Structures are given as structure tokens and as C-alpha cells.
Image (cartoon, grey):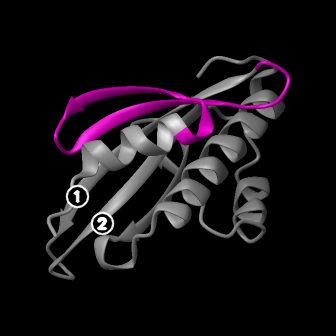
Amino acid sequence: MKFNFSELMERIANEIGGQYSEYDKTKSVIIVPLSENRYQAVVGVEKYIEKFDKTRVEFSSKVCPLSDDIDLKSLLVENAKTCYARFVIIDDYVKVEGSTFLENISDGGLKEILEEVAGKADEWEMKLTGLDVH
């Protein structure tokens, strides 16, 4: 059976009551509903990793722009408390990412990764900015 990333992402969005938007066959966005009428945008990408000769699915969500007043140690400590998600700094933004290889995918597993990425990004967005931006 051929893996269809777009169909899977749309199905997960529908299951969680989120909004789905497709950029192309390998990239889409799900607006994830959270508690207290908050939402978090999560980008999903299907990406080939040459080093491992495998394809993975990666979820990413922005937290806030990187600034000198962010306690980076606290983000690293928080990484140890998550199952799938991790903090990263890309293009001067603090983001939360989670990924798995295509061969390990199950609908429930992807949904768990997506929800942890969205929840952690939203939690730290509020801690660091006090706003619901992303």
C-alpha cells in the first residue's frame, strides 16, 4: 500500500477537530484546537533523510522568536520531560518538533506526536510571551 501523507494528515485533523491545509503532497498545516479556546499551528512535512536512507514525518510548531532573555537551559530541561517533542532553534525561532520514520507510523502514534508538539509549543509560547500567537 502506498503511503499518502496528505490523506493521513487530513484524517488526523478531522479526528481532533482541527483545520487542515495542504501546501503540497509532502507539506501541510493543521490548526490544533487546545484548551481554553487556544489553537496552535503545526506544520507536517514528509522528508527523505539521506543519512538513514529513510523517509520520516516531521511536525514543527513555532513558539517565539529567539531572544537573549530566553532561558535556554529551561528548554533543555523540558526536553527530558517529553516523549516525542523536542525544542529546537531554527532561523532564529524557538520551535517544538517531533518526528518518526515512515516505517514506524500508525495513525494513533502520529496523532500523539502532533498533539504533544502542539501542546508543548502552546504552553511555552504562553510562558515566554504571554500570548497566543501561533
Q: Name the disc covering residue 37, or none.
A: none
Residue drawn at x 40%, y 70% as measured from the top left: 105
77 left or right, relative to 114: right
Check if residue 61 falls in the magenta segment: no
For the residue carrying disc 1, how many other residues have a C-alpha within 10 Å: few (<14), some (14-19), or many (20+)? some
Residue 86: tell me if it is visible: no
Boundaries of the magenta span: 15-37
Q: Name the disc covering residue 56, or none.
A: 2
Mark earlier in primary sequence (1, 2): 1
Residue drawn at x 71%, y 18% as measured from the top left: 132
Under circle 2, the secondary element is: strand
Check if residue 18 falls in the magenta segment: yes
Q: Residue 26 appears at what percent x and percent y?
A: 20, 45
The three-letter code of the residue at mark 2 reads Arg
Residue drawn at x 50%, y 47% as measured from the top left: 89
Q: Residue 41 appears at what percent x and percent y?
A: 53, 29
Residue drawn at x 30%, y 71% as measured from the top left: 102
108 left or right, relative to 53: right
Where 104 sits versus 76, above or below? below
For the residue carrying disc 2, how many other residues have a C-alpha within 10 Å: few (<14), some (14-19), or many (20+)? some
Under circle 1, the secondary element is: strand
Q: Are marks 1 and 2 in contact (CB under 8 Å)?
A: yes
Q: State the residue in front, 80 or 59.
A: 59
The three-letter code of the residue at mark 1 reads Lys
Q: Quadrant of the N terminus?
A: bottom left
Q: Residue 32 appears at what percent x and percent y?
A: 59, 32
Q: To which quarter of the image does residue 77 belong?
A: bottom right
Instruction: Tell me how far mark 1 sits from mark 2, CA to CA.
Output: 5 Å
14 left or right, relative to 56: right
Q: To which quarter of the image does residue 122 belong?
A: top right
Q: Name the disc covering residue 47, or none.
A: 1
Where 117 sits versus 18, above or below? below
